[in-house]
Image (tube, grey):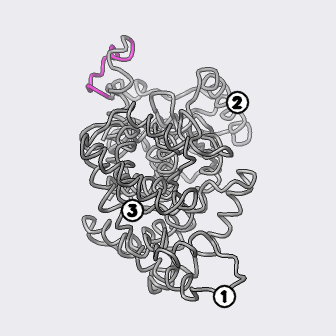
């Protein structure tokens, strides 16, 4: 998969980076005024305008813990430590009452021996603020990230493109993450990335993307971003609940995580001013996050982990399908939800049935295509646009039915099936024409968009297992 498909997050401008360097100096000065001793400052060296993304964050926080533990084992316990979170990347600080040169020697193996050590910037400052250099310890300059040369010519001449450097960066970060057990924090971060990838995928017929708001007058990309960042912590909590509930039956997990879902929905509505951007995602991705935590808490075989997560998600979701629809048909006077109406009329279970079935639509109609495209090096936006068409051609989207009718939804399915039969990979101009048609008819396949996001999440997760 292309490295840029991993590096998704807010872009940092040069003025922000320059101000960040000034802020770092001020933090270092304040830390050494508070504790007049050796100061360790840790950051990751990430090329390009995006500095914060799940892989980098996971490696940073794990490495910061590793630095602290290395100092403890070396009988150099930090007197104080803190992390400054910034859009240009987190910074970790540790005050140590020990000789700066000895601290540098103890931490050097992390830069030299860890898989992503070349990305570690572990600066050790003397009490007077002067940095201990590698040359003072008789060490050569650090090698080029791409070609391994140590003469510094590559950096001075800009011998490698940003994309080449990012490719090397992602390879190292993935190798480093391979040393960690999958954490609830990482599961939550991947949820954030998958939701951003879905909304950034362009073009998407009738849906919010980077070119327009589709058939939605109350939503745009910025609103989806607000919702996504507001929800990340709740997906982490779903995963953490799964870890904690490993001794319970999978079928009982839903009752424990539903309160988290209610909190998440309230947080979403507060962030968006009452607009429902991700209610379906809270349910479906929340169940998958909980299933991932539940399974990884005790897994032994990495190659079987993904099927186990999907099977466990099915068990977790089963009570929702059974309980939510068990009283149907309902008495007259009850205000039916769209899901209840569609279940009564067409026996369509919507996202509840998808989840209870182990997300078969994802497994059959999206994952095979998305994985093929991404593995071949296609950009995720183009891959996602094409994979979405296969979902539209095969899935009974409840949102589409709600905004039109069952007849219209079936007609759209058939039209897109015919389109894919003629051309399995329609051009962007063809998909944009579909977008215009959907907007004219006020059609939006929000359910399929959610399934695309779930597929992104599963695909990303597969690289870490």
Residue 156 rendering spot, x and y as whole percentages: 39, 12
Residue 177 rendering spot, x and y as whole percentages: 37, 51
Residue placed most toward the observer, 456 or 300: 456
Q: Dot 1, how many residues are within 10 Å of its Cα: few (below 14), some (14-19), or many (20+)?
A: few
- Quadrant position of residue 304: bottom left
Q: Which residue is mark 2?
A: 26
Q: Which residue is mark 1?
A: 331
Q: Left or right of 106: which side holds 124?
A: right
Please report the residue visible at 27 percent of the width from the left and 27 percent of the height from the top: 148
- Give how far apart the Cα atoms at labels 3 and 1 are: 50 Å
Residue range in magenta is: 146-156
Q: Secondary structure at mark 1?
A: loop
Indicate which label's residue lies in the foreground, 1 or 2. Answer: 1
The numbered mark at residue 181 is: 3
- Quadrant position of residue 451: bottom left
Indicate which label's residue lies in the foreground, 3 or 2. Answer: 3
Judge whether residue 292 is colored magenta: no
Judge whether residue 149 is colored magenta: yes
* Image height of 144 relative to 305, above or below: above
Task: Name the chief secondary structure element in magenta.
Answer: loop
């Amino acid at each position: 998969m292309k490295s840029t498909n991993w590096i998704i997050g807010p872009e940092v401008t040069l003025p922000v980076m320059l101000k960040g360097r000034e802020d770092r100096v001020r933090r270092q000065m304040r830390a050494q005024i508070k504790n007049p001793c050796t100061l360790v400052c840790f950051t990751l060296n990430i090329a390009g305008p995006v500095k914060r993304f799940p892989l980098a964050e996971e490696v940073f926080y794990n490495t910061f813990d590793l630095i602290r533990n290395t100092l403890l084992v070396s009988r150099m316990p930090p007197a104080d430590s803190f992390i400054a979170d910034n859009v240009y990347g987190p910074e970790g600080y540790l005050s140590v009452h020990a000789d700066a040169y000895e601290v540098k020697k103890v931490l050097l193996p992390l830069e030299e021996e860890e898989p992503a050590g070349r990305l570690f910037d572990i600066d050790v400052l003397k009490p007077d603020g002067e940095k201990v250099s590698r040359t003072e310890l008789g060490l050569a300059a650090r090698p080029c990230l791409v070609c391994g040369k140590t003469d510094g010519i590559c950096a001075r001449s800009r011998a490698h493109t940003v994309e080449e450097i990012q490719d090397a960066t992602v390879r190292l970060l993935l190798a480093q993450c391979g040393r960690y057990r999958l954490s609830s924090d990482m599961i939550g971060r991947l949820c954030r990335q998958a939701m951003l990838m879905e909304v950034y995928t362009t073009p998407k017929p009738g849906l919010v993307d980077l070119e327009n708001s589709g058939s939605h007058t109350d939503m745009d990309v910025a609103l989806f971003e607000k919702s996504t960042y507001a929800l990340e912590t709740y997906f982490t909590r779903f995963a953490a609940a799964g870890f904690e509930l490993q001794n319970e039956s999978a079928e009982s997990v839903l009752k424990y995580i539903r309160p988290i879902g209610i909190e998440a929905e309230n947080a979403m509505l507060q962030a968006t001013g009452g607009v429902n951007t991700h209610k379906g995602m809270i349910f479906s991705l929340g169940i998958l996050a909980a299933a991932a935590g539940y399974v990884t808490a005790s897994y032994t075989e990495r190659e079987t982990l993904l099927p186990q997560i999907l099977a466990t998600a099915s068990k977790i979701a089963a009570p929702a399908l059974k309980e939510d629809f068990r009283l149907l048909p309902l008495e007259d006077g009850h205000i039916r939800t769209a899901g209840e109406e569609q279940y009564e009329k067409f026996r369509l279970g919507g996202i509840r049935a998808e989840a209870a079935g182990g997300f078969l639509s994802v497994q059959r109609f999206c994952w095979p295509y998305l994985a093929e495209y991404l593995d071949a090096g296609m950009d995720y936006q183009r891959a996602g646009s094409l994979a979405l068409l296969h979902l539209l051609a095969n899935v009974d989207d409840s949102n589409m039915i709600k905004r039109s009718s069952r007849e219209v939804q079936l007609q759209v399915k058939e039209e897109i099936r015919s389109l894919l039969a003629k051309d399995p990979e329609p051009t962007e101009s063809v998909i944009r024409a579909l977008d215009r048609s959907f907007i004219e008819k006020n059609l939006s396949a929000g359910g399929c968009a959610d399934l695309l996001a779930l597929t992104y999440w599963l695909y990303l997760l597969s690289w870490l297992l």
